[in-house]
Structure formats: C-alpha cells, structure tokens
Amino acid sequence: MEDKFIIEGGIRLKGDVRISGSKNACLPVLAASLLTTEKCVISGVPRLADVRTMIRMLTELGAQIGVQGSQVTVQARELQKTGQLQQYARKMRASFLLMGPVLARQGEACMALPGGCAIGKRPVDLHLKGLAALGAEIRIERGFVKATARQLQGAEIVLDFPSVGATENIMMASACARGTTTLVNAAAEPEIVDLADFLNKMGAEVTGAGTRVIRIKGNPSLQGAVHTVIPDRIEAGTYLAAAVATGGELRLSRVVPDHLRSMIEKFREAGVCIEEGNDELFVSAPQELRPLNISTSPYPGFPTDMQPQFAAILTTAAGTSRITENIFENRFLYTDELVRMGASIEVTGSTAVIRGVRGLRPACVKATDLRAGAALVIAALKAWGETEICGVYHLDRGYEDLEEKLGGLGCRIRRVTEQAANL
C-alpha cells in the first residue's frame, strides 16, 4: 500500500502551530541511552517513522522500552549483537549512530552500511576515522562495518569536515573512553549541544559543544538521566515557509529563535515580517516576495535541510534567485517536480537558478526524499487546484502530524492510501 497527499492550494494559512521535538536531536539521544545500564527518560520525542525505527533497533539490541505519548523510557541492562539490524540500516542513515555507543559498551560492534535519503554519498569514513583514533580496529566486509576495541582511549581527532553524524558518534564513544578526547572541526549544530547536555547528565564531562572544538572527558560508568529534546528547527522553518507560500499569518510556539537565525535573516531579506518572542515566532507574509541568493553551509550557516523549502517559495518571487548547495551533491532532484508545477528552474552543477513565475499549477508529483517532500507540500499550498504528492512515507520520517497541523491552519489536505503498482 502506498500513501499520497491530496492538497488543495490557494488557501491562506492562519493560526497557531506547536513545534515538535527535534528528530535530529532525539535520534542520537536515544542511541546514547545504550551507554548505561540504568534507566533513561527522554521527553519531547516526536512520533515519526525514523523514531519508531530507532526504537525497534534498541529493542532488538535488548533494551527495555516504554513509550507514553512523547516520553520514551530506555533501559539497556544487557546488549545483544548488532548484525541483525541490517534491515533497519537500509531504511535510515541514523542507524549508524548506534556504532559508537555499542562499541563503547560491548567492546565490539557490527553495523550494516546505512541507507536513507538519496541526496548524496554521505560516506561514514569520518565516523570510522574517529573511532579508529580512539583505539578501535575497523574492518569492512560484505557491506558491514566491524569494530573491536578492548578499551577505548581518549585522543585528539581532527575531522576533515564538520560532519554532524561523525561528531555525534565520536562524542558518544568518547563518553565511555579513558582519558580526554579533543574533537577539532566538530559540528556546531544545536543538536550537538543537546546531545552534549544529555551526556553530561549521564556523568560525562563534555565542554565546547556548539563550537568547533569539543572536549569529552570519559566516564566508564555512566548513569541514567532525564532529558527533554530541543524543538525541531527544520520543522519550524518549514511552517514559516508554508505561511509565506500562502500569504498567511502564523504563530509558532515551542521554538528557539536563535536556532533559526540564518533562516529568519533570509526570510526578512525576502520581505517577510517575523517577530520574535522567548519561545515563539510570529510570521506575516508580504504580498510580493523579493528574490534571494542562498548558499548552504554547516551551522550556523544556512541549513541544507531548508534549501528545498526556500526554493519552493522563491518560484514565485519577483525576480531571479540563486541557491548554491555545498553539502549534498544530489539535493536538487526535487526541482524537476517543481518544474512540472510550472516553476522556472535551471540547475547547473551545484547551483539552481530560479526565475519567478506568476503562479504554480497543480500536478501529480513525487517526493524523492524528506525535505523534497516538504518543498512539494509548500508548492502545493501555492498552486490553485488539487495537487497529488506521492512518496508520503518520506514526510512521515520527519514531520509529526503534518496533516493535522496543516489542517488546523486552514489547509485542505487529505491522505489517500492506494494499492502500489506491481512493477
């Protein structure tokens, strides 16, 4: 069976929307709960396909899991072997975040090379380089990565690129290592800071999170912890873009405005009015959007996870916009679908040139990845008439209660389940 969305566009969004907990924060926190035999209580966990996949993986590893609303309890008194997780690794790249915690806990780990969205190569070599520097012996055989280490030892590790996943894996492995690890050219995303906060509650000593140099003083006997994950900044940015696409007015609650700083600046540059509160944002869209030049880069730069959504709103801006993608080489796959809806987009290498048109038309389109799906939803909100979006499972991986939240803002959206064609 295959789900699709039917969206009637041309309706102005208006109202309040509460932002869910961050997918990209809760996945590493759930993985880190394996570093202790004691109970960890994690709140603010969104109901997402990727989160369910991570919970299934933790369960198969032997952890006892309790789920009550947005709160997840994890206790891993004993761990099983990791080789049986191959089926999940194909679905979700974040599966590889279990490598560091399991290696630190058991002295060995075997993980299938991960899959996920088809937006680029995203190799795991930086993860493996870091684990090897901590003393692990690494072997790659028949699609599996095997790591062994009698005792991880702190080290100085310099990343070639500030990879978020590699930074998280190294932080988690180092949290149980002997001595101090210094991680240079680390990722600085808010999700890294959130993981550091959780590890510190468990008894590690992590300093410098949010900067390019992180120091982790290990503790072989980490304890349980109670933690609430941060709000999802990409979900917040997506709803801001949805409001702009429809000329709407929204209040976003449970947000951290500083986490969205690069996005907010670009929205304002395009003529959008955004007012900030302590944990909320008010957005009012202009009648006409100004064109933008956007270049993606690691945090605190403009996030690659928001460039498809911005491309969607810029399709009808008054002028020519340019988006340069510096993180993932295949992230412009979605532009063909926007062109089917009447957009004027030309992609050359890592740059997309978007010439604003008067309006978009409805069409049958397909999401190729999570954020591409978000871009198509935004485009559908702009187009007059009904747009069909296939590949909804991608959106289920990263947006909690998307239909309900959009419906509460006035959007006419419905989910339809159909029998998938046998090819």
Image (cartoon, helix red, strand yellow):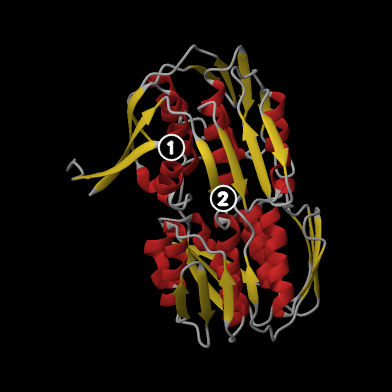
- The foreground one among 248 and 385 is 248
Can residue 293 be seen here? The reply is yes
Q: Which mark is residue 410?
A: 1
Q: Pick the quarter of the image with the C terminus.
A: top left
As drawn, the residue found furthest toward the front would be 15
Placement of 223 over or under 254, stated as above or below: below
Q: Pointer 2: what residue?
A: 123
Quadrant in the picture for residue 211: bottom right
Please report the residue visible at 44 percent of the width from the left and 44 percent of the height from the top: 408
Q: Residue at x 69, y 86 (%)?
A: 221
**Amino acid tagged 2:** Pro
Relative height, residue 6 to residue 233 (above, below) = above
Answer above or below: position of 36 versus 390.
Answer: below
Disc 1 is placed on an element classified as loop
Q: Quadrant of residue 139?
A: bottom right
- Using the image as rendered, state which of residue 126 and residue 231 is in the foreground: 231
State whether residue 81 appears in this view. no
Neighbour tally class for label 2: few under 14, some 14-19, many 20 plus, Cα within 10 Å: few
Observer-side mark, 2 or 1, equals 1
Q: Is residue 384 left or right of residue 139?
A: left
In percent of width and height, residue 406 lies at: 44, 42
Question: Dot 1, how many residues are within 10 Å of its Cα: few (below 14), some (14-19), or many (20+)?
Answer: few
Q: CA distance from mark 2 to mark 1?
A: 41 Å
User: Mark 2 falls on what kind of element?
Assistant: loop
Which of the 4 quarters of the picture holds residue 415? top left
Closer to us: 233 or 108: 233
Q: Amino acid at mark 1?
A: Gly
Q: Which mark is residue 145?
A: none
